[in-house]
Amino acid sequence: MMKKILALLLAAIMLFSLVACGGGAETPVDQDQPTTQVDEAPYNGEMPIVKPDDEPVTLEIGIVSEPNVTDYENNAFTNWLEETTGIDLTFRQFMDHSNAATQVALMVASGERLPDIILRFGGIDKQQGEAYGEDGYFAPLTEYFEKYAYYTRQAFEMYYPDQPDLFPMVLRRGAGADNRPMYGFPNLRTGQYAEVMIQPWINSEWLEKLGLEKPTTIEELYNVLVAFRDQDPNGNGKKDEIPLLGRVFGSYSQTDPLNWIVNAYTYYHDNTYFAIEDGKVTAPYHTDEYREALKFINKLHKEGLMTEQSWTQSGSELKGITNPTGDSPFLAGVVFGNGEGMFNRDSRAMDVYVPMRPLKAETEKGGYAPTVYTIPYTTYISTDCEHPVEAFKLLDFMNSPDAYLRMRWGEYGVDWVYSEGGKPGHRGGEAKIKVLNPDVMTDQNAQHWHYVATVVDENYWQYEMDLSDTNDWNARHITKCNEVYSYTKETPRPEKVFDFAIYSESDYEERSEFAKELLSYIRNRRAAFSTGEMDPNNDADWQDYLDGLEVNRYTRWIELAQIGYDRVFA
């Protein structure tokens, strides 16, 4: 047992990157599992969870403190949860996600009582959660999901009506290989805008001045960027325009222009990495189509249409260039970033930049706009909890429409209200809510917990917002962001995509030995080819790159992904 405790402690301090390695490991069960308590009565989400005549139930929630929350105990959302569910809530606050994981490890090592619910501890990933579960610290949740996931299922059905198998797949991945228990409560990190992997914006004033249209093909993009470079669209008499500006940031980022360009040539998902062709897992990094994309990016760099600044600048620097203040001229033509946080209220940028569609296919394998979601399993019920059924029902209820609206928009009647019938909504339908305080998430207050802990992030967007006041900055902003979302949804995806995989312990350990180094090699060579350090037009340089892929076990990487994919879909 001491070895296990020490291993857990080290694991919590030295965290693995699930994105880089592609999922959590599966640890063999080597002791008896705690018995799951399950009521026999069918559950249909009725409230309160604890009836007035029942014995009182108090649950302690371990939560990572948000600096904008002034009070968790006397909090509008907390009070509403207690009144609705009949459960008394207390809180044990942790400083940040990484330190919180270390604190949990120390509590385990010292035998200290754990909180009843450990709510979205980002530092405890699926692999470590399973290790805690199999050593008896976290409760197995498989039977609870089968019986009590009333609102959780509802959330998936509402947000993903065209993917009826998504919720079972999320549970399947959570349970892992060999039908082991599911310990973590999933949180599908996505949202109407957050799931849009590529978000390109173009300066509409420059287009209008030069008599140009928004580009939709590689050739049109090139011609527009040349005009931005040569024809002084900002009118200041200086050649200071930056035709294309983004931020290349390791793996998946909505600021990365390479994602947008490469997808014109081949399906390119810089988060899940793989594609599916006739049931076979493939990767693009060795293909002719990927090489052609690098040739085009290299051309942009050679001609000063995309600068090396995109590889070196910070997110705040990108945002600063995008949002000039006062009478300062605009400097960037095409920029990349998440529209929700890209534009400042004190800048004209939100009205000047307009979204672009995904680029049309340059090859038979291109023309895509990938979407992204990750699945952290970072909420747990500890075995110290004396009321695990009530704890699970509470987590499930937090996925109800009422709960996630209050979790995101604050107190009903103060920060938001239900909209009167007939008002236009931001997605083209009828508005369901009207936001009274759009800054409730960014201001310091005790209106809610300042993050959305629902199983599907931001599924509150299904409740269309009243945007009838076209002078309201928030209304115009959301309308524009929704345009980005609609462009992505209108663009076809491949018939099959690589969204889920389950790795056994041995597979995960093998991947961990080389995946991080392989991905680093791929990204370093991508930058070298793009910026001219290596020449994608030179066959010797390209062959040297291909040889390096195999040295870094590229083929084995794809083989292990195939095994993990087949565990879910075969």
Image (spheres, rainbow, N blue to C red):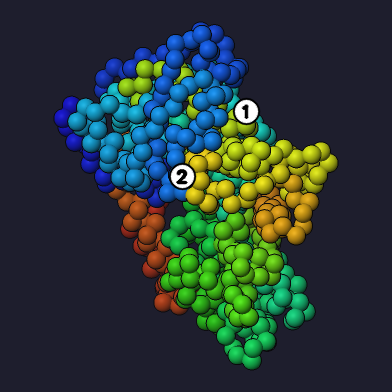
| Amino acid residing under circle 2 | Val
On screen, residue 521 versus residue 214, left or right, reads: left
| Amino acid residing under circle 1 | Gln
Closer to the camera, 50 or 145? 50
Closer to the camera, 197 or 265? 197
Closer to the camera, 300 or 100? 100
Query: What is the crowding at mark 2: few (fewer than 14 residues within 10 Å), some, or many (at least 20)?
Result: some
Query: Residue 154: which numbered mark, if any?
Result: 1
Q: Position of residue 96 (x, y in %)?
A: 35, 46
Of the numbered discs 1 and 2, the one sitting upstream in the chain is 2
Look at the picture and state if 211 lies above or below 551: below
On screen, residue 343 versus residue 428, left or right, reads: left
Q: Position of residue 522 (x, y in %)?
A: 41, 61
CA separation, marks 1 and 2?
29 Å
Q: Position of residue 569 (x, y in %)?
A: 53, 33
Look at the picture and state if 143 lies above or below 349: above
Q: Quadrant of residue 11?
A: top left
Looking at the rendered image, the quarter that the N terminus falls into is top left
Determine if residue 281 is in view. Answer: no
Query: Residue 475: which numbered mark, if any?
Result: none
At a point 53% along the width and 22% down the height, the residue shown is: 85
For the image, the number of numbered tags is 2
On screen, residue 340 versus residue 282, left or right, reads: right
Closer mark to the observer between disc 1 and disc 2:
2
Closer to the camera, 9 or 248? 9
At a point 67% along the width and 87% down the height, the residue shown is: 235
Identify residue for label 2.
69
Q: Disc 1 vs disc 2: Cβ atoms closer than 8 Å?
A: no
On screen, residue 416 versus residue 497, left or right, reads: right
**Residue sitting at the far left:** 2
